[in-house]
Image (cartoon, rainbow, N blue to C red):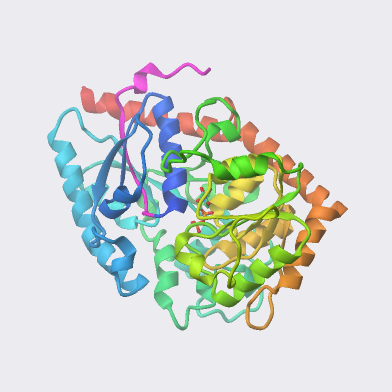
Amino acid sequence: MEKKSTATRTAHCLVLAFPAHGHINPLLQFSKLLVHQGVRVTFVTTIFHAKIMQKVPPSIALETISDGFDEVGLAGAVSLKAYAENFWEVGPLTFGKLLEKLGRSKDEHVDCVVYDSFFPWALDVAKRFGIVGAAYLTQNMTVNSIYYHVHTGKLQVPLIQHEFSLPTLPKLQPQDLPTFFLTYERKQFLLQYPVAQFSNIEKADWILCNTFYEMDKEIIDWIMEIWPKFRSIGPNIPSFFLDKQYEDDQDYGVTEFKRDECIEWLDDKPKGSVVYVSFGSIATFNKEQMEEIGCCLKECSHYYLWVVRKSEETNLPKDFEKKTEKGFVVRWCSQLKVLAHEAIGCFVTHCGWNSTLETLCLGVPIIAIPFWSDQSTNAKLMEDVWKMGIRAPFDDKKVVRRDALKHCIREIMEFEKGNEMKNNANQWRTLAIKAVKSGGSSHQNILEFINSLFYLECRARF
Ligand code: UDP
């Protein structure tokens, strides 16, 4: 095991995350890496989200800020727009109060704020207190680059072109861009928020991204000319599923599973025989789409494990049985453990960035049904660049029909194409492990970042 840097033992980092699984998970994982190196971490999220988190790793302190909806979170707002507007007003105020409170105590002195780049205001607040700010980009570098080009005016909205050539990226069609470009005329604000990540980014002392150099070489070389303080530090996935340096690091650390029924169910299924279906923590497909997925799974000849969140259960096909010999529908699972199980043959996913990275790190081929946001871009990369899966085709109503999905499942589960994709995914897995291992690209970058914290901590002490 790597020797801890004793010098960094008292450096204190505040890690601020947007209240959603796709943000909490990687930022918490990054926090654990800092703790392993002797950095003290206080994790910060909203009052409401802290209430629904089942646990936090014991080595990490928890503090909260307000989004203005402390009782029910987003559900309390009349719209996403209203939620964000309120949050962007109340969040900076309460974050400032938190920094003020911690600053009053000598022991709690904060050396650095690592902020979810969705909160550009956090950098302004940190700077007001004279604290170093590190932006953490939770989306992939292609997506970040697309939004950055909107920020600089090089990519214009509303879209006027039918094909886009941006530096170092493959040619992109409108449907490959984040969906917020396509809905821009109706809902401008949806695009404004991710673009605003870059409004003050040049003032950040560090720009960290949950990717690894070997996967994004060209784009990282290009962006480092513009942002010299950019560093790839991923994949931020529990160590047990990657380099196994910390064998007991087997989940992100926020969900409690008393008895893992899914794993028990998977245990007696043959190798590569189960289709795992999950669309993350936010996507809400309509009844028609759920019906098509449900009927496909029932009719196709493979086992399936399907995550349908409680809020989505009403959209299941009528009388759909939740547990049969062939299939199991659960409300949530330990996704990493499921993906790592040898019974899994493919993953039908919305292509959220975390799910995409997880499946890439575990060598599982993908069938993509993107729902919104960056997922269509991730699906494009997964199919055309990393070549580890296929996008399920949809019809004029934007619904993936049961026969189309059945065809994709057969291609991956029964034909050589599936093996090729699995091999490709496994090659990415090898590179990802190399990046996070001692001496690897992400590992070196994390050490460089931590050493800078040590320097700050020394400066504060003397
Ligand atoms: N996840 C999980 N159990 C589930 C479904 C999802 O643990 O049943 C985790 C998954 O491993 C990932 C996160 O939730 O880390 C979802 O993030 P992603 O970026 O893929 O999608 P989002 O929820 O942001 O749309």
Q: Residue at x 23, y 63 (%)?
A: 89
Against 275, residue 423 (above or below) is above
Provide residue 98's location: percent of width, then percent of height: 19, 45
**Over which residues does the magenta segment extend?**
1-19
Against 402, residue 9 (above or below) is above
User: Is residue 101 visible in the rendered structure shown here?
Assistant: yes
Give 209 or 272, whichever is nearer the viewer. Answer: 272
Provide residue 173's location: percent of width, then percent of height: 66, 72
Give 321 or 428, whichever is nearer the viewer. Answer: 321
| Res 358 quadrant in image | top right
Q: Residue at x 69, y 63 (%)?
A: 297
Q: Confirm whether the magenta stretch covers residue 12.
A: yes
Provide residue 330's location: percent of width, then percent of height: 54, 54
> Quadrant where the C terminus lies?
top left
| Res 37 quadrant in image | top left
Provide residue 443's location: percent of width, then percent of height: 53, 31
Q: Residue at x 54, y 32 (%)?
A: 239
Q: Confirm whether the magenta stretch covers residue 5.
A: yes
Give 117 or 286, whichever is nearer the viewer. Answer: 286
Residue that lies at the very extreme toward the right in this rendered image: 416
